[in-house]
Amino acid sequence: MLQLRSNETLDHGDRGWLKARHHFIVSADGNPANGPLGALVVWNDDEIAPGTGFGRHSHADMEIVTYVRQGVTHEDSVGNVGRTAAGDVQVMSAGSGISHSEHNRDEAPLKLFQIWLRPRQRGGAPRWDTRKFPKADRAGHLIELASGDPKTTETLTMRADARVLGATLLAGTTLTHAPSAHLRHTYLAPAQGAILVNGQRVAVGDGLAALDEPELTITAMEDAESILVDAA
C-alpha cells in the first residue's frame, strides 16, 4: 500500500528563522492522516535562516538522524562539537537524556531532513556521531547511511530497528528496492528533483509512505536525490 503525502497535506510551521514541513503529525491539531510508521515517528523538512538555529534543548529515548542538504553545527552536553556538511549525516542516540544545540553558521539558509525513530530499548548512554557520504558513491543505487544493525561498520549506527538509505539518480534512470522482511514500513522523500515510485510521482516537498510493499521501483523524472527509511 502506498500513501502520497504531498506538500499540500503536510503540516507547516513558520517561526521566521525556521520554516518547517512536517511529514508526520507533530501536534493534536495536525493532519491525522500523516501518522507514524512503526518506529518512524518524525520526518521534518527544515529550513533555518543564517545565523540562527535551535538553542540548547533536551531529548531522551529517541534516535535522531539528520540528513544535511545544506551545513549545520552541533554541540551537546556530552562534549561533542562538529559541523556536518551537505550530503552528510549525523546520528544522535538520546538514550537516558542529552541536551544539544544545532545552528546555521553559514551565510545561506540551512536545509535538512530531521528523522526521529523510537529506540529498541529505553535508556542507555547518549552518543553522537557524523560521517561523510559523497554523493558520487550513491550514484545510481541506494547506499546505507545509518543502520540499526549493531554489527555494522560501514555506516552510522543507531539503536532503532530501521535503516536509512540514500541515492542519486540521473534523469531517466531506475533502481529497485526490496525492504527487509522485518522492516515493513518505508518512507521516502526527494531532497532534490522528482521521481516515480511504483508509478506514483513524488517531488521535492512531498513524501511517500509504503506498507508491506515487496518492491519499490524508483525512476528519476529529472536528476534527483532521495532519502529512504525502512523501519520495523
Image (cartoon, rainbow, N blue to C red):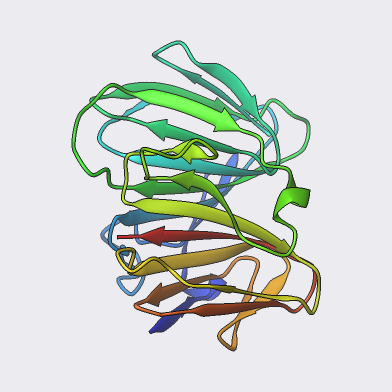
Would you place residue 115 above or below residue 78 in this image? below
Height in image: 20 above or below 197?
above
Q: Which residue is drawn at 47% across and 35% down?
A: 91
Residue 78, position in %: x, y? 40, 13
Left-right relation of 134 to 151: right
**How far across and down, in percent of the image, does residue 192 sit?**
71, 61
Residue 153 at what x, y percent from top left?
49, 35
Q: In this view, does 190 lie above or below 18?
A: below
- The answer to whether one can see residue 116 in this image is yes
Which residue is drawn at the image coordinates 73% and 43% (left, top)? 134
43 horizontally vs 200: left or right: left
- Asked if residue 56 can be seen in this view, the reply is no
Quadrant location of the C terminus?
bottom left
Instruction: State the image quarter where residue 181 is shown.
Output: bottom left
Give whichever of 157, 109 is nearer the camera. 157
Q: Which residue is drawn at 37% across and 21% down?
A: 99
Q: Residue furthest left?
A: 122
Of 35 and 173, nearer the camera is 173
User: Measured from the top left, where is residue 61 in percent x and y?
Assistant: 25, 36
At horizontal 32% and vertical 46% (from top left) the residue drawn is 160
Name the quarter where the N terminus is drawn.
Answer: bottom left
Give the camera-side residue of 114 and 31.
114
